[in-house]
Amino acid sequence: MIQRNPGFANLTAGYLFPEVSRRKNEYSKNHPDAKIISLGVGNTTEPLTPHIAKAMSDYALSLGTVQGYSGYGDDFGSSDLRKKIAEEFYPNENIEADEVFISDGAKCDIARVQTLFGRDVNLAVQDPSYPVYVDGSVIVGAAGANNGSGYDGIVYMPCTAENNFFPDLSQIKKNSLIYFCSPNNPTGKVSSKEELTRLVEFALKNECIIIFDAAYSEFVSDSALPKSIFQIEGAKKCAIEVQSLSKPAGFTGVRLGWSVVPKDLKFADGTSVNKDWGRLMTTLFNGASNIAQQGALAALDETGRREMRSVIEYYLENARIIEKTVRKWKNAEVFFTGNSPYLWIRFAGQKSWDIFDKILDKCRVVTTPGLGFGPAGESFIRISAFGHRADVEEACRRMENFSM
């Protein structure tokens, strides 16, 4: 028989969020009368806004007519949508429409990035960080087995309270793929212009490429903080930006994202990364749903942007409500920037899964254990502000007097 892909054998345990769900379900089975509130997985909860929903509904109905039917879309996404994204998200960065590639979400594009660069590449990731950066790299063979403190072949860059959640870049090898997220998931840290300038300058000097995950950029309300890596001079020569409407527009199930691959970005032999990315997309992907793309166009017009802003503010208010509660916890350090839907909380000396289990047992609230995001996440939990307001308020009542 064909041998198993060794990358799967190298993965430890299960993917973080299914394990969270497993423990939640096990608790529910043993406590059938418990009403568990989830503030764990970062899944949006509020309905699509009327303008966006109507645009998709009207388009879907039109597919039932000869005049309105559409088959395959444009290879790299609707030309109107690519142009609109360039205008709305990168108004001062000189990003052109043909540098924007529409997809079915940031997570899917990150997997395609790993296919693009293959297994023979140096890797560096923020620690803690979104698990798919690491797990996807292990699956494609770019990283090896877990040695107890992380996977072989990956440079982990600790982002801690002590370094203001911005890592020491000097440990990164030359010619590395650097996974970087701002606002960071899970810490909520938004890197400053000065910090991102250091990152870009390092990448240029050491011939690295940054994979910049900006999926939460619309939650940044402080105008002094960059929302895009392309706000930094030189980034078009060393970075790919991955973006999504999942969190700002509630498209977690609709699935619509994009990647910006500048034409200035080159491989070592001078080959265009933009060109190879286009080839990969047309080979492995048939395009985002035409219905989802119509929803994205609606989300980015004047009415859609206004509605989207109101939903973002709803989740940020949830986060502020949660913050008031967890600030009362004894022996807990709370990190919250006000520019992210996540709160990052440390109980020094405690194990993340123990904190998770105790909050679930005592408060019947699901959080996310920090260790699942990387070794530096030990002793932390992440609390998500994605939830109905009534559930958030009830969860806060239950957690009011929590202590480890």
Image (cartoon, rainbow, N blue to C red):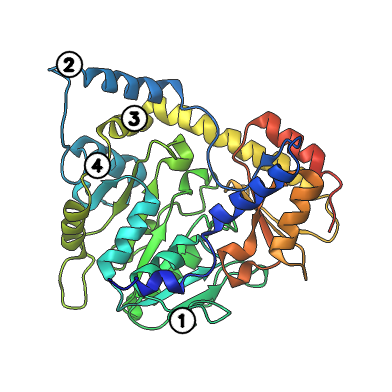
Q: Earlier in the sequence, mark 1 or mark 2?
A: 2
> Which residue position holds label 3?
295
> Which residue position holds label 1?
152
Q: Position of residue 197 (x, y in %)?
A: 43, 67
Q: Are marks 2 and 4 in contact (CB under 8 Å)?
A: no
Q: Earlier in the sequence, mark 3 or mark 4?
A: 4
Q: Position of residue 306 (x, y in %)?
A: 46, 28
Q: Is residue 135 left or right of residue 97?
A: right
> Which residue position holds label 4?
82
Q: CA distance from mark 2 to mark 3?
A: 19 Å
Q: Position of residue 226 (x, y in %)?
A: 46, 54
Q: CA distance from mark 3 to mark 1?
A: 42 Å
Q: Are marks 2 and 3 in contact (CB under 8 Å)?
A: no
Q: SS at mark 2? A: loop
Q: CA distance from mark 2 to mark 4?
A: 26 Å
Q: Which mark is residue 65?
A: 2
What residue type is disc 2 on? Answer: Thr
For the point 51% across and 69% down, which residue is it?
126
Tell which of 67 and 231 is nearer to you: 67
What residue type is disc 4 on? Answer: Arg
